[in-house]
Image (cartoon, helix red, strand yellow):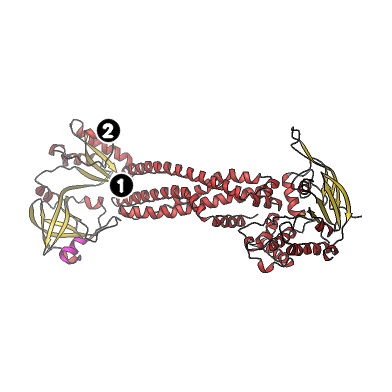
Amino acid sequence: MQEPIIDMRGIVKTYNLGMPNELEILHGIDLQVYPGDFMAIVGESGSGKSTLMNIIGALDKPTSGQYTLDGVDVSQAKDKELSVIRNQKIGFVFQTFNLIGRTSALKNVELPMLYAGVPAKQRTERAKKLLEMVNMEARAKHHPNELSGGQKQRVAIARALVNKPALLLADEPTGALDSATSRTVMDIFHRLHESGMTIVLITHSQELAEECSRILTLRDGRFIGERKGAGRSASLG
Amino acid sequence: MHLLDNIRLALSSLWANKLRALLTMLGIIIGIGSVIAIVTVGDSLTGSITDSLQSFGVNNITVSLQKKSDSDSSGTSVRMFGPESPDEEDLITDAMIEEFRQAYPDKISAIALQQSLGSGQVQQEDTTVQVTAMGVNNDYALANDLNLMHGRFIKDDDGERQIAVVSDVFCESVFGSSGASVLGKDFELSVNNKLLKFYVVGIYEYDDDGYVSLSNSDPVTDLYLPMETAIKLSGGSSGYQSFTVVAAAGTDTSAFLTQTKNFFASFYTRNQSYTATASSMESMLEEMTSMMNTVKLAISAIAAISLLVGGIGVMNIMLVSITERTREIGTRKALGAPGIAIRMQFIIEAVVICMIGGLLGVSVGVGLGAVGANLLGYAAKPSLAAIALAVGFSMAIGVFFGYYPANKAAKLDPIEALRYE
């Protein structure tokens, strides 16, 4: 079998370490995500979903345990190295889109390349190509406040993919969208999955999780089971 | 992330809050503007006076009488005489000057003497032409750099002849021409309640000294008479309140200045009320420059306080801006912005605010300075050094007061920042 993209072993996250209000959120998580996986992590609020997502996304470091992302040891990385990992290895898609206001959709898509030091001409070319892929090329010059929620999320997906990350990490990507636009966004994820992209989708919605190939359920900081999802066919039924 | 991208980003975020940005800049604008305005007026003043003093010649030393009660302001020269004039026995005599001439024969190029008669009028048909009449010796032309157009200057052996050297401006008004044909013509000068006929023997070119004339009327020009003629007209007094020594080329003017001062002061050691003092263009300039520098220093101190307040304003607004944009900062960090890129972004934003404020301040200052200089009657000379310094200083303020907020932004925890509502 191939090397996993995400290889987590015994991940523990404790807040307020050594203080009277010490709180352990994750109790030894083991997780392997392989190239091409479309993995859903489902859990109620308070299950430790967000904490796990932050660790997967290299926004936070585990208190103990081993985490390797695409061959890079994240658990030992310094702040500066973490920002490079986030820039090069991970594409974030947020529930609230988090586009930067006052700049065009195109500039938003260019942003991760800006921090990667890609020359301006290449930046624009690549950003345009990705906007085309999500069918947003016509609105490249629009500012986020001139776009609908679904359009914003499509721009955000283009932005997440622009540095060719090893992993697309989506946190409730349809949480702020109505069902029709949610569908468009999920269809993009399926298309990406079919082209071989590794995707981790974090959600509380069972329905959405069913569309993925693997479903992991998190409760009280532990995985309580894994099953196979129906894949894209779930959305067609 | 490149500098240009950062600047563009800073401009767009300032543009989004135009009024706020402008109000923030106000402190910087006022601070920089006031410094530039004062420096512009000061430099124009110094520049014009320097120009006009320079036209008297750099080697000129002016010897003049000074009241003894004022002598504690030692060595000063520009001091005018008080309400009462010195008595005849106080005046500098020809004998003293002759002794001086013999004491330093190789250091003196010329000694310009003048006996002022005050203002005079020349009646020509229905117009009256005003002049300043004075008796002079031959060296006067040299010391004052007069440019003779036609004829000759007053000579020392002209005695009491009723001849005059006049300006081209005077000739135009009185004779309608300033050509050589005017030489030998006569006019009637009324001075000291006397009306006398004079013949024109020379015409010099009037130099306006670089002053900006506010009125269109002709300037009052000097009219030169032979020394003895002037003494007779003034009522027989034959001493001088002041005269000018032109030092020979190659003489150390400042050393010679001290010698001259001591030489003439020695004649007045027993005089109760007056002493003689000497000054040169250089010493006057030094004095004026030091006065201007004091004024500039005082204004700069006020401006520095204004800039400090302005800088604190910038820091305050940057802190507000960073709080407002916490989510944006979180997003940028999630997309892989290192702390240094965030810090750079906000420092540049602060520098851009300050620099725009500085540039606006410079334009306000140059404008006000030009108005001020014109009101005083001088041509405005904006100081490029002051402008460069002001813009540079405002940028430094941006870096200094932008650093703390920018650093705060750079250190934000991305998770907290993304969660911020």
- Quarter of the figure with the N terminus of chain B: bottom right
Counting every numbered tag in the picture gives 2
First to last magenta residue range: B168-179
Q: Does residue B175 appear left or right of residue A180 in this picture?
A: left
Position of B78 relative to B272 (above/below): below
Left-right relation of A65 to B356: right
Q: Residue at x 26, y 42 (%)?
A: B78
Magenta stretch: dominant secondary structure? helix
Q: Amino acid at mark 1?
A: Asn
Q: Secondary structure at mark 2?
A: loop
Residue B150 visible in the current orientation: no
Q: Which mark is residue B72?
A: 2
The percent coordinates of residue A84 (x first, y second) are 73, 50
Q: Position of residue B193 (x, y in %)?
A: 8, 51
Residue B298 visible to the viewer: yes
Q: Residue at x 43, y 49 (%)?
A: B30
User: Counting residues from the N terminus, which is met first, the one under dot 2 or under dot 1?
Assistant: 1
Tag 1 residue: B59
